[in-house]
Image (spheres, rainbow, N blue to C red):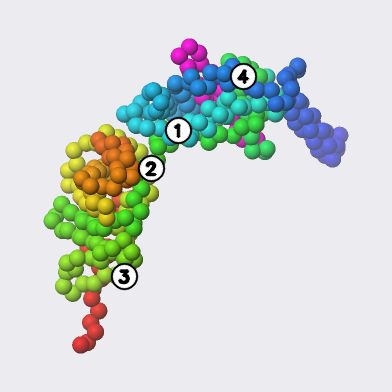
Amino acid sequence: MNRTTLRLLGFVVAVLVTALLLLELNNTGDMPDTGTPLLPELRSVANEVNSITITRAGQPTVNLSRIESRWVIPDRGNYTADVGKIREVLLAMTESSVIEPKTTNPALHARLGVDAPDNESSKGTLITASTQDQSFELIFGNVAQTSFRYARIAGDEQSWLIDQNPDIPADAGGWLLANIIDIDTDRVKTVTIHHPDGDVIAIGKETEDDNNFSVADIPEGRELSYSTVANGIGGALNDLNLNDVRTAVPAENAVRSQFVTFDGVRIDASVTTDEAGKWVSLDVHLPAGVESDAVGEWQETADRVKGWQYRIADYKANLLMRQWEDILTIEEDTGE
């Protein structure tokens, strides 16, 4: 048998093996029609779900709980969870419909990413949605070329291609309600930053229509590095989001800043740094006489941030910790 014949036989064998594997992956028998709900029982009790767990191989299990009407994360001190992300996953479970059935062979589940997460090499994500009386378990697997996902009901060998592809954060931090506070720069009147060494930086605007913040008490021989350099400080609390959260702990050597808005609200921010990153705690103080239509907004923020410490992006923390060398340069000698 010559070399050409051997190559041809090898090619034929490879094609046959591939074809058999594809047949096995699509070995379905008598299956429901396309569009059949995968978890019809969950649909009828979706509003009663009060607990969700997310299990991945080699990662801590994420627990989400509903306390009355609020979803929280017990591992983060019952901090508020992002209900939008929870809704997305629950809808993916309740509304998932069969596009086509796939393999029933457990040995091939890993190829679709629907093997159980107790397998150390599993790529699947097991979602358990529970009511007071029952639980529903669905393993979300790989994303198919259709951009939908493979899935399998836990305990059932039949796998499926379904018409859903939810975003499922990998850790507890990804399920947190991200926004901490959002104060538009135009609403900020003054900011004062106090450093542990005694340095103080104070910026302010006369009116809400002013474009730039002015800087008080600039040291002799120095000037602003550019005219808008203080605006970043004034906007530090604009769309401030968390990366993680913990119960507030006493802060040593903190950089403390004070924001005052044009309607008289004061926000105290305290920034500390540890091996995990930069953390900020906030206290919101409402004066008497705040406009009635703003009271509810400010009070909700004050209640939500009280007693918490947030890990935030470095660039945001750095704005709250600005020092003179960050905003000043040596004053040019005009020769006059």
Q: Residue at x 20, y 88 (%)?
A: 336
Q: Amino acid at mark 2?
A: Asn
Residue highlighted by disc 3: 227
Tell me where residue 237 appears, x and y as whole percent. 32, 50
Label 2, residues with CA under 10 Å away: few <14, some 14-19, many ≥20: few
Labelled disc at residue 40: 4
Can you tell which quarter of the image residue 51 is in?
Answer: top left
Q: Name the element at disc 2.
A: strand
User: Is residue 138 highlighted in magenta?
Assistant: yes
Relative to 212, say whether 19 is above or below. Answer: above
Label 2 to label 1, Cα distance in Å? 13 Å
Label 1, residues with CA under 10 Å away: few <14, some 14-19, many ≥20: some
Considering only order in the chain, which callout, 3 or 2, is on the residue closer to the N terminus?
Answer: 2
> Which image quadrant: the N terminus?
top right
Considering only order in the chain, which callout, 1 or 2, is on the residue closer to the N terminus?
Answer: 1
Relative to 146, say whether 150 is above or below. Answer: above
Considering only order in the chain, which callout, 3 or 4, is on the residue closer to the N terminus?
Answer: 4
Labelled disc at residue 83: 1
Q: Name the element at disc 4.
A: helix
Considering only order in the chain, which callout, 1 or 4, is on the residue closer to the N terminus?
Answer: 4
Question: Can you name the residue that lies furthest to the left here?
Answer: 198
Residue highlighted by disc 2: 179
Label 3 to label 1, Cα distance in Å? 42 Å
Label 4 to label 3, Cα distance in Å? 62 Å
